[in-house]
Amino acid sequence: MELEQFRSVWQQYSPEPDDLDRRNRSIATRLAATRVTGHQHELSGSIRRTAYIGLTMPLLAVSLYLIELAPVWFAIVYALFGLGESIYCFLFASQIAKSDYFAMPTVDALACARFFVKRLIRSKIISVILALPIIVYLFIFIEQTGEIDLVIGGCIGGCIGLAIGIRKLIIELHHARSIVNEFECD
């Protein structure tokens, strides 16, 4: 092979630096989109599962009333809390899932992701504040039955529920903050 032929072949297969830079940016954008979409899917799925759990609360409320652990007004409040939490979680999960971060300018996508982190934290705080009186009142009813087994079971269930809730919050915050971090790196 002559030197000129070799140069010609080399130039055909040697990409231009601008072309390499454009390809690298394209690959980096696709990787970021895949990571963001994965975190977005996990976050909305986790919140949606919380909504499904809230849908079981009306059934539990009926059970509490039927086994005479709670009066009818308490069962209604308990059921309404569960339904309200479910509706909120379904709407929130839907908003997270529908957000198209890559159709937005980076600044807007970052602001949207940060808003979801703040909203997630606020919603968890509000849920705990609203649930606390319900839980305390439920324990008062259980304690008044005089059945020590129910009190111990309620305490164990409360501790397990708290541990699960904290773990779930940590995972949800990880996914939400990971979305923010992807846009902060740009």
Image (tube, helix red, strand yellow):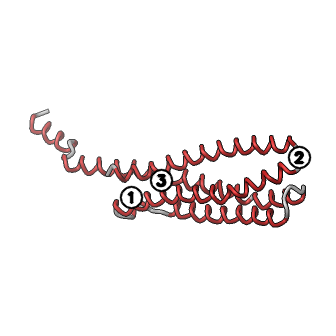
Label 2 secondary element: loop
**Amino acid at dot 1:** Leu
Q: Which residue is mark 3?
A: 37
**Amino acid at dot 3:** Thr
**Which callout, 3 or 1, points to the residue nearer the camera?**
1
Q: Quadrant of the N terminus?
A: top left
Can the viewer see residue 122?
yes
Up-down: is 2 above or below 47?
above
Q: Are marks 2 and 1 in contact (CB under 8 Å)?
A: no
Label 3 secondary element: helix
Up-down: is 109 above or below 181?
below
Residue at figure coordinates x 65%, y 42% from the top left: 163
Q: Residues within 10 Å of mark 1 (few under 14, many from 20)?
A: many
Task: Measure how far apart labels 3 and 2 are at the Cα level.
Answer: 51 Å
Picture coordinates of residue 6, whole percent (x, y) = 14, 36
Q: Which residue is mark 2?
A: 146
Between 125 and 30, the residue placed more toward the observer is 125
Picture coordinates of residue 87, whole percent (x, y) = 65, 65
Q: Which residue is mark 1?
A: 110
Residue at figure coordinates x 44%, y 52% from the top left: 179
Q: Is residue 88 left or right of residue 175?
A: right
> Mark 3 or mark 1: which comes first in sequence?
3
